[in-house]
Image (cartoon, helix red, strand yellow):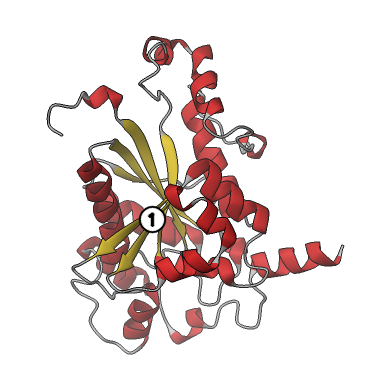
Amino acid sequence: MATEDPDKKTEVVLLACGSFNPITNMHLRLFELARDYFHETGKYKVIKGIISPVGDAYKKKGLISANHRVTMAKLATKNSDWVEVDDWESSQSEWLETLRVLRYHHQKLLSPEPTNSLQNAIPLTKPGRKRKQEPNRHDPVKKKSQSPDIKSVPQVKLLCGSDMLESFGIPNLWKLEDITEIVENHGLVCISRAGNSVQKFIYESDILWRHKNNIHLVEEWITNDISSTKIRRALRRGQSIRYLVPDVVQAYIEKNNLYSPESEDRNAGVVLAPLQKHASDSKN
């Protein structure tokens, strides 16, 4: 493995979407576990991790403002030399499907000029091909794209926990065509506990089974049961969250008095944006 030419490894960008309400040490560990996994294969080089907090229009119960969630994520990653926070998704006035966020970040890698346009979140029409053809237009990557062994545009893969993967089975939460495009054109990196039923879930889904080679299951041997829900519960009860979130995040929460019984009731009784949208789509 050590003798391999690093330039011939497939470059990967890990994208994590979610509420990050608040960001925890577990969220940060997902990136480290995924990077270790890819590097140990000897075939990939992880060049960047992106945290993309969901916008307020998601309407999840207890979801505090995106401004606070993005700020906490930035504080949590300020000492990381490879994980960064992107606020494009959270700054949109409407809720965006995860697929559109993946498309946006893929497009951003194709274009040298940064873009904030929703129109640029276009699908990859031909998996595999577009990645090789598109960069030839841009001078910075021309040199690399002459070699068939080098994939000059990094692959953007969706990083998630087993709960997100299993949420594919919840009616109206995800569109079938979105799931297909995510696993076919981008790929999933799923961190799961040893003995978890993720493999069974993939086996029971025809779509996931068809693209199982593009679903990377990473076993988490040092188990970590921290969740944002549990953090919020501890805060409501006046309990310590130290060592569960980065110190800077804890200080920010305390300074701004962020999580309370009142904040937990935000969006109570409101239908989650994807359920609302997909249910109305199916009626039309």
Question: 76 or 43: which is nearer to us?
Answer: 43
Picture coordinates of residue 209 (x, y %)?
A: 51, 57
Picture coordinates of residue 217 (x, y %)?
A: 35, 58
The residue tagged with tag 1: helix, strand or loop?
helix
Picture coordinates of residue 222 (x, y %)?
A: 18, 68
Which residue is located at x 60 percent, y 72 percent? 170
Q: Residues within 10 Å of mark 1 (few under 14, many from 20)?
A: some
Mark 1: amino acid? Thr
Give the number of callouts.
Answer: 1
In the orientation shown, which residue stands out farthest toward the left?
A: 2
Quarter that holds the C terminus = bottom right
Q: Is residue 41 visible?
A: yes
In the orientation shown, which residue stands out farthest toward the right?
A: 284
Q: With respect to residue 204, does 176 lie above or below?
A: above
- Residue at numbered disc 1: 71
Picture coordinates of residue 114 (x, y %)?
A: 50, 28
Q: With respect to residue 197, does 72 lie above or below?
A: above
Which residue is located at x 54 percent, y 52 percent? 210
Which residue is located at x 28 percent, y 65 percent? 26
Q: Is residue 5 left or right of residue 75?
A: left
Quarter that holds the N terminus = top left
Q: Is residue 125 left or right of residue 142?
A: right
Q: Is residue 47 left or right of residue 243?
A: right
Based on the displayed image, in which of its 4 quarters is residue 278 positioned? bottom right
Question: 260 or 175: which is nearer to us?
Answer: 175
Question: 110 or 143: which is nearer to us?
Answer: 143
In the orientation shown, which residue stands out farthest toward the bottom?
A: 237
Q: Is residue 90 visible?
A: no
